[in-house]
Structure formats: structure tokens, C-alpha cells
Amino acid sequence: MTQKKAIILLSGGLDSVTCLAIAQSQGYQCYALSFSYGQKHSSELQAAKKIATHYKVAEHRIIDLDLGGIGGSALTDSNINVPTHETFEEIASDIPATYVPARNTVFLSIALAWAEVLQADKIFIGVNAVDYSGYPDCRPEYIQAFQMMADLATKAGIEGNGVQLETPLIDLTKVEIIQKGHSLGVDYSMTVSCYQANDKGQACGHCDSCLIRKKAFEKALNSDPTFYVD
Amino acid sequence: MTQKKAIILLSGGLDSVTCLAIAQSQGYQCYALSFSYGQKHSSELQAAKKIATHYKVAEHRIIDLDLGGIGGSALTDSNINVPTHETFEEIASDIPATYVPARNTVFLSIALAWAEVLQADKIFIGVNAVDYSGYPDCRPEYIQAFQMMADLATKAGIEGNGVQLETPLIDLTKVEIIQKGHSLGVDYSMTVSCYQANDKGQACGHCDSCLIRKKAFEKALNSDPTFYVD
């Protein structure tokens, strides 16, 4: 029997490496997909490369895509600052400036194209609807709607062999994600979560992503492998 | 009152220019979106540029995206020939080798991102479910599913200001599309439909797209502005 294939959307952050570890533990031959989309924190791509090599994926494809030219997000537009806070409690509850318009839809669409060519069974995406930043494209109802669309969009889909989205982290807290990854031997020091990490992959310590990560590591492991500059 | 904005997916073919003419006739400020995705018939992009200039669009964005690297289509893979036939009647009824996996999904996703930044009201796409090549992502049920997904995917969507897909050609025959465009003054000599047009934009005359176009022009206008090399 040939090994089943899975595409893993690999940003280089802690969620995506956990997804990769889960897919591999389930016996999938893993294909990693990353995007150079104009993000300020391009050191996450270095992390993604390191992770892909570490996990010996079948292939790691990095797609160049100029979402920065389209603009509209603090993650890609040099005229919009990444919001920072002193403490976790100050994180705003509405959709923040770091939201990138339609990002997961764009990423999943390209994964869908690749999945059809590879005849992959699954696309793993590390979306999370519990400890997240309020992004609409991380919610279960969005994922379900994408699946319905995908089933109609492709030759494989209408022939009944369409790829299935897998969201193993969607109902987990950040603490549970770290515990899950830890149990699978994930070395989180390889990952970059910070929205404005420097060239060395060091974290600012004050963006939403840093504050969420910091709090979760303290609670989950009582230690944090991340280097924060402040 | 500010003028409403529309994005038009502009391939440079006859359907997309007709969409642009329709959008403009409805009073929209038009933003054209094209893709350099590794297509063999890159002269369609030259046609798109010419059309965008002719119609004085507010902006013409050409996104570079390496779908050719993913492969799986006669339109992007140099190892797969574009199928050709002697006559229209020989066109196969199943999904042909020119199908590009998830192409409309990828294009619409990026249009969705841009629409949110522009606060556009509409995305016009020239899909057609009558005289088409059997592509799954040209059918009304696919478009409806994409719309449902889009409404959940974006900040604008969940706030009730999401962009709406417009498919003015979906129920028209190719003959009716040409008649519609003709009534709006479209100069179809600017367009390129051929899947393997040469650098001058001249058509092969024998791919599915040429055969469908040729027959439709003969029926609609009793003349054809296309230069076929054979």
C-alpha cells in the first residue's frame, strides 16, 4: 500500500510545526508549503526551512506571492505598525491590524492546487479558534465552507477523491497545543511566532503573538524556549 | 456619492474583456487583475495590458504566481502538450488536459484579498457554464460555494460588507457573449483566447479554445477578427 500524502501549511510558527508533528505521527508522507508573501517577519521562513529539514519532509515548497503589494495589513505594510502591548491582558478583542485580508483562503487555495497534482489526501492547517487573534479565517465555520467549496472546485473533488482539510488544533488552547507538541517531541526553539521577529528570529516580546506564546509556554511547560529581545 | 468599485479578473481573452465592458457600462470604477502563472500563452497578458489601457481602468495589477512549478496542466507544464483537433466536433466532453488545478479558486482568493483592501463591491469573473471546456470551477454551484466561503473568510464579510461575485456570462452561449460585447463596442481583435498563442498573440487554430472561439465568431458576426496561423 502506498503511503498517504498530506500537505502541511508551514509558517514556521508553533502551531504549524505541531501540525506537522501530528501528521507525521499519523503516518502521512508530508509535503510542506510556505509562503513568502511580503511578511515583515520573514525570519519565520528560515524557521520553516529548518523545521522542514528536521522533519525530513518529502518536499518543501515556498511560494512567492506579493500580498504586500495589495496591502491592508500591519504584517505586510511598512506604513502600518504591528500593535504592541505591555501585558497579555491588553490584547484587543476585535480583529487586529495584523489581520491579512483573505490570507488563509489564498494559502489554502494554493494548497488545494498542489494537493490535486500530488493526489494528496489531506491538507493540515494549524488554525485555532480558542487562543487566537480574532481572525475570521481561523473559525470552524470558515473551514467547513472552504471544504464545501473545494469539493466543487476541482476535478478530484467532483470525482469524489478531493482532498480533506485537517485542523487538529482548532479546539485546543495554546497551552494544550504546546503540551500536544511536547508529547510528540517537538523542539519549539526552532519556531518563530513574533510578528516582527528580527533577522536572527528573535522575538519582540510585545506583539499579540509574542504575548499569547509567552503566557502559554509559562503555563504549559513552566519554561519558554523563545529568545525575547525585551 | 463615491463611485462603486469592481475588480475584474482579466485574462486577456474574450470572456474577460466582455466582463470588463459590462462592469464599466454598469458604472463601476474598474480594477483589473491578471496573473502571470506560468501559462504557455503569456501573450494573453500582453492582450490584458492592452485592454486595461484601452478601458482606462483605475489600476491593473498583474500578480506573479508560480503555478507552473506545481504542474498538472497542459497550460503550464512543458511536458504536457495542449490537445488539438481538426474540427470543433472532436472536442472531448470530459475535463481536458488544459484544466489547471484550482485555478479559479486561487485567482478568486487573491481577488478577495484585494477587494477587501479596496473596499470593492464586486468581483467580475467571466466564467461560463454553457460553451465551456468542462472545467469544474466554471459552474454556478462552485461560484455559490465560493461566495458562501468568502462571506465567512474576511473581516468585511463577517461585518456584512463583503464583496459579491458577479458572473454575467455564466448562462450565455459563446455566441451570445460575443453579441453582448459587440453591442457594447468591444473590439475583440485585442483579445487572445488560444492556449498556445505565439509571441505576437496569433492563434494556433486547433486547440479547444480556438475551435470554440472560431465557431462562435462565425455564428455571431459572420466574421472573425482573430489571426489563426493554421
Image: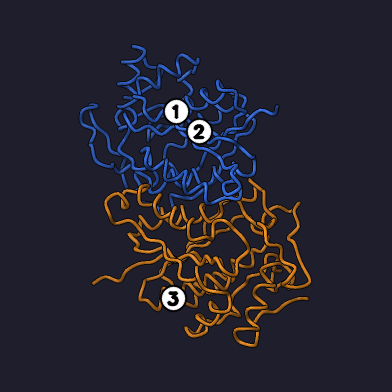
Chain colours: A orange, B blue
Residue at x 37%, y 20% (from the top left corner): B176
Q: Mark 2 near mark 1, Cβ–Cβ under 8 Å?
A: yes
Please tell me in which quadrant of the rendered image residue A84 appears: bottom right
Would you name the residue on which mark 2 appears?
B124
For marks 3 and 1, give the CA distance. Answer: 45 Å
Would you name the residue on which mark 3 appears?
A22
Chain holding disc 3: A
For marks 2 and 1, give the CA distance. Answer: 8 Å
User: Which mark identifies residue A44?
Assistant: none
Image: A168 above or below B19: below
Image: B96 above or below B214: below
Front in this rendered view, residue A72 or A36: A72
Chain holding disc 2: B
Q: Secondary structure at mark 1?
A: loop
Q: Secondary structure at mark 2?
A: strand
Q: Mark 3 near mark 1, Cβ–Cβ under 8 Å?
A: no
Q: Secondary structure at mark 3?
A: helix
Front in this rendered view, residue A202 or A216: A216
Q: Position of residue B113 (x, y in %)?
A: 58, 46
Q: Position of residue B217 (x, y in %)?
A: 35, 18
Q: How many marks?
A: 3
Query: As drawn, which residue projects farthest toward the bottom?
Result: A222
Front in this rendered view, residue A66 or B29: B29
Would you name the residue on which mark 1 appears?
B168
